[in-house]
Image (cartoon, rainbow, N blue to C red):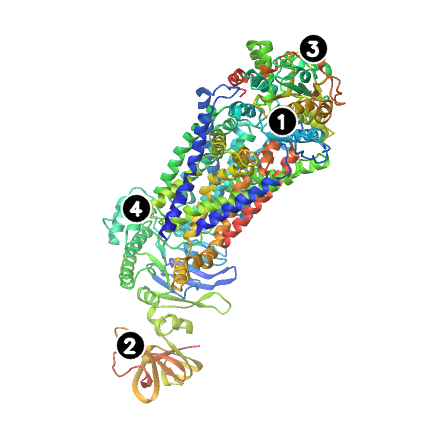
């Protein structure tokens, strides 16, 4: 028997002064699942998140949490303090005048197990021993861990996270991200995470929801799928761009292959007609060829190089393992490898 | 840099001040003194300062609105220029005259309240005046020391509302004012100089105990307290109180500005009643004056018919020269006035102590 | 350059030692020879009740305005209700209107035959501690409102949302989050309002409230004045010390996060009633009543053909003395402001700043007394005469020099507080570029520094102009004899119960004050 999803969003829509911000967003988060909402800055992800958290009353659509309707078409609105949804903020928002222990304690309402629970939570995030410190004296990573512990203290069934690692530097981000995944799985908490960082979304989420501009204004969900799927087979051009470096070239598809200005390519899925070919940089093979296209720039990235190649179809992004011959100004021949997706 | 700016602003400031010092804004008397405001006094044509007679320097406790036109007329007649130094309070000026001693530039001291003239006379800081001068005024107003001369009088009266107080209801004596039938209907101004002068007179006439008892009875009436006299007249007219204890000329002065004023003055019919107090204003010549001639001429003018008529008609006061007609609205009072030495009116030390003791100060 | 620096320091010390002048005056007063008539000295038994009443009034008004101001400040910062912005601006307006004007209007309209008095059937004149408390509360609440609103706006929104996400209802959020952080603001407001009330003269004078400042004005004899002056300072100095302590220990707001707009909750139920009531009190007593009553008096006087005292004098004098006073004060304040902002070391700057504020901490009435007795003492002990034969000091007094001097002393702190941020806000790099391009110090100042300072200097000038125009005790005691300003006229006419004159002068003063205030507010918003 299928379990009721922890979070159900149906046809959510909301306007701000100048126009729509979200249109027709529908999404489900199952029990103990982590869904990441990926979108550009200002694309309405915050509005979506705040609607779920209970700070915004969406004008259209419905939200149910653990089966209970918390908002419906601007009516029947249950405010944040009564929803039982935990929230981790981008700037962690710890109470500056309270100690760590008091911060974590804040959301616990039953006196009985409060102290032990605080201890357990702090140990879980690896901050035991820092109970009496003030938030201002901790590092960024430590502060975010406290924020997580605090949000989990009231045992919420759903956790929403608003770009939680945006203020942390890269190695820290990775570490905390993994910890977050583990803690959530352990505690059995569902999570909705909102971010513009694709690496985060792809690495942490069980499923990724892509928020992209809707034709009538505002944003809509264009694709909800597992990270590998979204990367391999993006639903729209916008999704393609959001999920990784990509070049889109107009092509003519006939069945399992397509032809474009760079030659022919094998398609993932049968398709006919004019469309755009999704070319990931790692799907491009280059061989030096004096009659070929010019490499206009080269950027070293540790494992290899990302090259910009000037082609009749526009600039092409290619990735290559270290190769001393592929320098700026060198001419190369291009070959498209593997199976490609197409978008309209 | 800033110092330069500061300096230039300072210089500009002083310059501007000097300019305004010359062409002052029109002088008005804020009626901080008990002077009546002269309305539409016809100013005589600008006096021509004569080169020969020396100017007379006057210290005046009476306000400029009254004094300026009066002294202008004097200058016009005699050709003697007058330089006037004002102060809001006669007391301050009297003190100043006393402390200045020989250095004083003052020739004439023109006082609102003659008690201070008495104090100065007692210290022999004023010249004895000639009989010729002092005999020009009514005998009862002549000073005992002969060192100052009364120029006009102001009477203490009750101002009442004819609509709300019947004539038979009015008290026959000042003592009777403290009757229960006036509870909640009376107003007074304990901080006012004339009030305090009157209490000083009462202490002298009735003695300390009777005065204190009377004041306590008055307090039992829960009188409204006002800062000055004009508000009482206006309050009577507007119905806030029915009776006020004021100086007589306020009614006339206010009526001139506002003909619809509903109030009337009342003097106690009993002859010699303590409530019928006349407070005299006057002038004297400083013993250190270097222009006695001019000073005498000025004093002569002040008791002349011209000036006395001015006091009567322009500021509604009681002239001290016999035979000068009062203003049409001002009743004669000679018979009913109480006799008291003007000097006691400035014996305010014990008066203030008494008032403070009773919580009126 | 060294010479200029020394000159600046000397100038600063000189200006700041202005505080010594009133003290010298009081010493003169003490050494005054006895006059012809010696009034009885004030007994100590009368001073204690005065002190107690003064403190009672001060703390009562502080508490009341704290309550009202917090309600309004909270509503302005966190609530949404119709007309919020307009009501907010209107509620702040009483700050611009002189307290004695509001007092005069309240007193006269609550009199038994006044418009409100006849409605409420009052039996006696509306004077004393109660009415004074009401008027001063209305006058001080806007200040608290602004303080509380800005403190709440600075509070990080994310923390409040975190608390909401953790299930905390509004009351708990207020108690756990806002209240602890608002405590310094509350303490500051309480102290400031108390100081204001203790120093206030106009309102308590008009309402005949038996407190220290009003008694001081009516003091007979120098000894009484000195005793009362000491009593006032004994009340003022501890509060000032507390204020300095509070300002010193205030740590900078440690908000751990980027500031964000607070979401506003709609106003409902008892909250709505409370907020609207608070607005009604502020706007009703502070704005509507004054405007309607003043207009009513003028209209009534005009209908009854009452002749009014001419206004050209007061208007001219107000303009003259206010402009002069503001210019001089600004010029004098510029010196310590420049030094503290630019040249001084931390410690020296601190000392200079404290000293500058000290000069303005003395209540106006006391300052006026000091300067007045200074003048009298100078006339006694150091007389000099001009070529025309007139006394030198007397001529200076007649030109208003002592009045301006007292204004400078009274408002130096205000001018300083307005100028310092303007000077601090200058971009030094601009001056450095100019000088690297070969411009002399003077040229740099003229072409680069001064133009950048003009907005700040103008705002400071307007602020001082407003403060001086409304000022009462110094004006009453030191305006040259025979002259009046608008403030003087309002007070005097009220004492004389010449309501039409109060109306005319009051309306002019009101328009001036409110107009300036609105200009300043717009200026600040654009800056």
- Element under label 3? loop
Residue farthest toward the left in the current orientation of the protein: A129
Which dot marks residue B270?
Answer: 3
Instruction: Give me the C-alpha separation between circle 1 and circle 3.
Output: 31 Å
Q: Using the image, name the chain to which the residue with label 1 belongs.
A: B
Q: Looking at this view, is B319 or B261 the one in front?
A: B319
Q: Residues within 10 Å of mark 3 (few under 14, many from 20)?
A: some
The local secondary structure at tag 2 comes to: strand
Quadrant that contains the N terminus of chain A: bottom left
Measured in 3D between alpha carbons, the distance from the residue under mark 3 to the one under mark 4, in whole angstroms, is 87 Å
Are discs 1 and 4 less than 8 Å apart at CB? no
Q: Earlier in the sequence, mark 2 or mark 4?
A: 4
* Secondary structure under the numbered disc 1 in the rendered image: loop
Looking at the rendering, in which quadrant would you find the C terminus of chain A? Answer: bottom left
Say yes or no: labels 3 and 4 on the same chain.
no
Q: Quadrant of residue C303?
A: top right
A167 lies left or right of B78: left
Residue beneath label 2, please? A305
Discs 1 and 3 lie in a common subunit = yes
Image coordinates for residue B49, horizontal then vertical, percent: 67, 34
Disc number lying in front (3 or 2): 3
Answer above or below: position of A295 versus B70: below
Indicate the secondary structure of the residue bearing disc 4: loop
Q: Residues within 10 Å of mark 4 (few under 14, many from 20)?
A: some
Q: Which mark is residue B62?
A: 1
Q: Position of residue C439 (x, y in %)?
A: 42, 62
Q: Which chain carries label 2?
A: A
**Mark positioned earlier in the residue sequence (1 or 3):** 1
Q: Mark 4 points at which residue?
A: A99
Alpha-carbon span between mark 1 and mark 4: 74 Å
The answer to whether marks 1 and 4 sit on the same chain is no
């Amino acid at each position: 028997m299928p379990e009721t999803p922890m979070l159900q969003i149906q046809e959510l829509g909301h306007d701000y002064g100048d126009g729509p911000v979200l249109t027709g967003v529908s999404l489900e988060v199952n029990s103990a699942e982590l869904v990441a909402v990926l979108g550009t800055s200002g694309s309405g992800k915050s509005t979506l998140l705040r609607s779920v958290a209970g700070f915004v009353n969406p004008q259209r659509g419905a939200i149910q949490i653990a089966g209970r309707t918390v908002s419906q078409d601007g009516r029947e609105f249950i405010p944040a303090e009564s929803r039982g949804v935990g929230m981790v903020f981008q700037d962690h928002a710890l109470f500056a005048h309270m100690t760590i222990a008091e911060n974590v304690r804040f959301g616990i309402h039953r006196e009985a197990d409060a102290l032990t629970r605080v201890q357990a939570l702090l140990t879980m995030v690896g901050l035991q021993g820092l109970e009496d410190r003030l938030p201002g004296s901790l590092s960024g990573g430590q502060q975010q861990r406290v924020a997580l512990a605090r949000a989990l203290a009231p045992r919420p069934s759903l956790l929403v996270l608003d770009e939680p690692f945006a203020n942390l530097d890269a190695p820290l981000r990775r570490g905390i991200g993994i910890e977050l995944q583990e803690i959530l799985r352990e505690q059995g908490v569902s999570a909705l995470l909102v971010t513009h960082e694709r690496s985060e979304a792809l690495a942490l989420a069980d499923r990724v929801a892509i928020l992209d501009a809707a034709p009538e204004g505002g944003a809509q969900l264009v694709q909800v799928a597992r990270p590998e799927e979204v990367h391999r087979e993006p639903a729209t051009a916008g999704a393609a761009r959001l999920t990784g470096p990509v070049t889109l070239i107009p092509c003519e598809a006939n069945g399992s292959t397509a032809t474009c200005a760079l030659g022919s390519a094998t398609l993932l899925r049968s398709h006919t007609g004019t469309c755009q070919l999704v070319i990931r940089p790692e799907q491009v093979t280059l061989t030096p060829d004096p009659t070929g296209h010019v490499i206009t720039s080269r950027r070293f990235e540790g494992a290899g190089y990302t090259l910009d190649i000037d082609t009749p179809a526009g600039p092409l992004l290619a990735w290559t393992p270290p190769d001393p011959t592929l320098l700026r100004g060198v001419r190369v021949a291009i070959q498209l490898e593997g199976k490609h997706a197409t978008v309209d | 840099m800033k110092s330069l700016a500061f300096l230039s602003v300072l210089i500009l400031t002083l310059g501007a001040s000097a300019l305004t010092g010359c062409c002052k804004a029109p002088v008005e008397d804020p009626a901080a003194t008990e002077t009546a405001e002269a309305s539409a006094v016809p100013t005589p044509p600008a006096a021509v300062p004569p080169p020969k007679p020396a100017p007379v320097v006057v210290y005046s406790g009476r306000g400029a609105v009254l004094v300026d036109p009066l002294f202008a007329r004097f200058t016009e007649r005699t050709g003697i220029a007058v330089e006037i130094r004002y102060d809001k309070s006669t007391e301050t000026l009297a003190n100043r005259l006393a402390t200045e001693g020989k250095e004083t530039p003052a020739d004439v001291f023109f006082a609102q309240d003659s008690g201070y003239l008495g104090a100065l006379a007692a210290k022999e800081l004023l010249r004895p005046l000639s009989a010729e001068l002092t005999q020009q005024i009514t005998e009862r107003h002549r000073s005992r020391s002969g060192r100052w001369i009364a120029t006009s009088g102001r009477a203490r009266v009750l101002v009442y509302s004819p609509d709300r107080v019947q004539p038979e209801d009015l008290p026959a004596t000042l003592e009777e004012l403290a009757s229960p039938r006036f509870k909640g209907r009376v107003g007074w101004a304990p901080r006012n100089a004339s009030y305090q002068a009157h209490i000083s007179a009462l202490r002298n006439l009735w003695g300390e105990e009777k005065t204190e008892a009377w004041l306590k009875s008055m307090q039992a009436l829960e009188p409204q307290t006002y800062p000055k006299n004009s508000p009482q007249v206006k309050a009577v007219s507007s119905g806030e109180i029915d009776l006020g204890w004021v100086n007589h000329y306020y009614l006339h002065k206010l009526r001139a500005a506002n003909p619809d004023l509903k109030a009337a003055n009342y003097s106690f019919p009993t002859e010699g009643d303590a409530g019928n107090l006349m407070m005299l204003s006057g002038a004297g010549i400083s013993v250190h004056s270097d222009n006695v001639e001019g000073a005498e001429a000025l004093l002569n003018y002040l008791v002349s018919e011209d000036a006395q008529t001015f006091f009567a008609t322009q500021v509604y006061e009681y002239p001290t020269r016999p035979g000068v007609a009062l203003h049409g609205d001002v009743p004669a009072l000679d018979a009913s006035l109480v006799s008291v030495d003007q000097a006691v009116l400035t014996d305010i030390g014990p008066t203030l102590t008494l008032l403070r003791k009773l919580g009126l100060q | 350059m060294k010479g200029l620096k020394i000159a600046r320091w000397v100038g600063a010390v000189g200006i700041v030692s202005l505080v010594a002048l009133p003290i010298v005056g009081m010493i003169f007063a003490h050494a005054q020879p006895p006059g012809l008539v010696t009034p009885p000295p004030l007994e100590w038994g009368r001073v204690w009740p005065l002190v107690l009443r003064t403190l009672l009034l001060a703390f009562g008004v502080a508490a009341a305005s704290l309550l009202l101001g917090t309600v309004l400040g909270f509503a302005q910062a966190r609530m949404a209700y119709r007309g919020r912005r307009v009501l907010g601006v209107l509620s702040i307006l009483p700050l611009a209107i002189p307290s004695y004007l509001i007092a005069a209007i309240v007193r006269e309209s609550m009199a038994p035959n006044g418009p409100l008095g006849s409605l409420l059937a009052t039996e006696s004149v509306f004077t004393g501690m109660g009415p004074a408390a009401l008027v001063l509360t209305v006058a001080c609440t806007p200040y608290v409102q602004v303080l509380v609103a800005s403190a709440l706006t600075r509070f990080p929104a994310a923390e409040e949302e975190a608390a909401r996400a953790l299930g905390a209802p509004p009351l708990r959020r207020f108690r756990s989050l806002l209240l602890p952080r608002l405590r310094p603001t509350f303490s500051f407001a309480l102290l400031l309002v108390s100081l204001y009330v203790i120093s206030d003269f106009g309102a308590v004078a008009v309402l005949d409230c038996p407190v220290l400042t009003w008694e001081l004005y009516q003091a007979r004899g120098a000894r009484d004045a000195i005793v009362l002056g000491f009593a006032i300072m004994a009340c003022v100095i501890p509060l000032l010390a507390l204020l300095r302590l509070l300002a010193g220990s205030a740590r900078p707001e440690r908000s751990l996060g980027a500031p964000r707009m607070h979401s506003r909750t709609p106003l409902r139920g008892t909250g709505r009633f409370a907020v609207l009531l608070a607005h009604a009190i502020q706007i009703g007593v502070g704005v509507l009543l004054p405007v309607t009553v003043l207009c009513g008096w003028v209209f009534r006087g005009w209908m009854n053909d009452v002749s009014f005292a001419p206004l050209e004098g007061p208007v001219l004098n107000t303009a003259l003395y206010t402009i002069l006073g503001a210019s001089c004060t600004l010029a004098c304040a510029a010196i310590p402001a420049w030094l503290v902002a630019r040249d001084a070391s931390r410690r020296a700057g601190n000392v200079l700043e404290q000293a500058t504020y000290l000069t303005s901490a003395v209540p106006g009435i006391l300052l006026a007394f000091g300067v007045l007795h200074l003048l009298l003492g100078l006339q006694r002990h150091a007389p000099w005469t001009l070529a025309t034969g007139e006394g030198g000091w007397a001529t200076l007094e007649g030109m208003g020099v002592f009045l301006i001097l007292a204004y400078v002393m009274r408002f130096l702190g205000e001018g300083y507080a307005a100028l310092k941020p303007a000077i601090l806000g200058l971009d030094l790099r601009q001056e450095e570029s100019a000088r690297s391009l070969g411009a002399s110090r003077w040229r740099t100042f003229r072409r680069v520094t001064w133009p950048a300072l003009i907005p700040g200097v103008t705002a400071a000038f307007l602020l001082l102009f407003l403060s001086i125009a409304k000022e009462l005790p110094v004006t009453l005691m030191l305006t040259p004899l025979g002259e009046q300003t608008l403030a003087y006229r309002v007070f005097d006419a009220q004492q004389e119960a010449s309501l039409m004159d109060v109306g005319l002068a009051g309306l002019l003063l009101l328009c001036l004050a409110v107009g300036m205030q609105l200009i300043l507010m717009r200026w600040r918003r654009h800056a």
